[in-house]
Every structure is written in C-alpha cells, then in structure tokens.
Image (tube, rainbow, N blue to C red):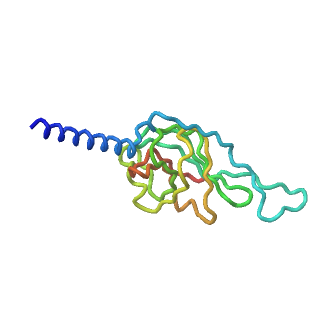
Amino acid sequence: MGRVRRTWWLRGAVVSALLLVAGLVWFEPWALWTDETVREAPPSASAPATRPSAGTPAAEPVTEARGTFVSHEHPTKGTVRIVRLGDGTAVLRIEGLDTSSGPDVRVWLSDAPVRAGRAGWHVFDDGRHLSLGALKGNKGDQNYPLPRGVDWQAYPSVSIWCDRFDVSFGAASLVRT
C-alpha cells in the first residue's frame, strides 16, 4: 500500500510541476513587473518621392489625427498621432505611453469604437483591424509606419492589444485635426 501511495504522490507532483511550468510559459506573470522604455525620436521630414526643384524644402511632417488612450484591462496613459511625412508615407506615433507589459502585445488600428472601461476590453478583434507590429515597449515614445496605401480613416481607433488573451490594455480614438 505504501509503494502505491508513493507512486501516486510522485505522479501527482510531476503533473503539478508540468502544469506550473506550462502556466508560467503561457501567462508570463513576470512581464507585469518588467518595464521596457522606448525613446524613439518623432518622425522627421522624408524626402519627397520626386526631387524638389532647387531651393524647395521637403514638406514638414503634418499631424493628421490625434487621440488619448483610455484604460481597459490595464491602466494605460499616453497619446497617439497619425503623422503624414513629406514623401506621403504615414506613421503612427505613440507618445508618453505608460501601460503594463504582457505576452504578445501588439499595436492595432481598428474599426471598432473606443469604449471606456470593461465594455471596451474585447471589441477590437470583432471587426476589421490591422496589426502594426509588436509593442516595442510598455513605456515611452515609439513610431509605427503605416503600410503604403492604408487609409487610416477606415481604422479610427488604436488599441494596445494582447493577442494571446484577446484583450485591449488601452485604446484611443483618432480624431482628425
């Protein structure tokens, strides 16, 4: 009887250890206490696609839209801008971001409306969305180039989106300036 009991305890301990390791790998709880600060410079004027005539400077970047983040799953602060460069390309600029880290966090443009509080946590993958890539850091200033030909007005909101758990950390409505 003692040997059988010991075998069951050993199996239980092994299964428990495997579940613990799998849970740690999946949830990455340490990410909640690690910060990655990014300090990218604002996008600057790019050379136009065609050479300007002598003495004609490249057009300066123009802010086409802006917004302020509201918190969802995690407290999130900061602002966002769509900046059009002299060569016609556009960049999503996040400034003063302060949110939590997490696994598989992305920057998304979405056609979903921004809702404050818990009502806005899960809406951004319901309709059309466009991933601009992995979040570079949970704090600071960062730039995300928009793909050529994308009309940002078709995606009037930005979400800091955790793809692993299908939840928004925070989001901002883009308002034309």
Q: Is 113 situated left or right of 14 in this image?
A: right
- The percent coordinates of residue 39 (x first, y second) are 64, 39
Q: Is 17 situated left or right of 29 in this image?
A: left
Q: Quadrant of residue 12?
A: top left
Q: Residue furthest right?
A: 54
Q: Residue furthest left?
A: 1
- The percent coordinates of residue 32 (x first, y second) are 44, 36
Q: Is 27 situated left or right of 67 in this image?
A: left
Residue in front for this viewpoint, 150 or 114: 150
Residue in front for this viewpoint, 6 or 15: 6
- The percent coordinates of residue 14 (x first, y second) are 27, 41
| Quadrant of the rendering where the N terminus is positioned | top left
Q: Residue furthest top?
A: 33
Q: Residue at x 61, y 45 (%)?
A: 142
Q: Residue furthest front?
A: 3
Residue in front for this viewpoint, 77 or 130: 130
Q: Is residue 134 above or below residue 51?
A: above
Residue in front for this viewpoint, 64 or 100: 100
Q: Is residue 87 above or below residue 94?
A: below
Q: Is residue 134 above or below residue 7?
A: below
Q: Residue at x 73, y 60 (%)?
A: 87
Q: Quadrant of residue 78?
A: top right
Q: Residue at x 30, y 44 (%)?
A: 19
Q: Is residue 88 above or below residue 69?
A: below
Q: Residue at x 65, y 52 (%)?
A: 83
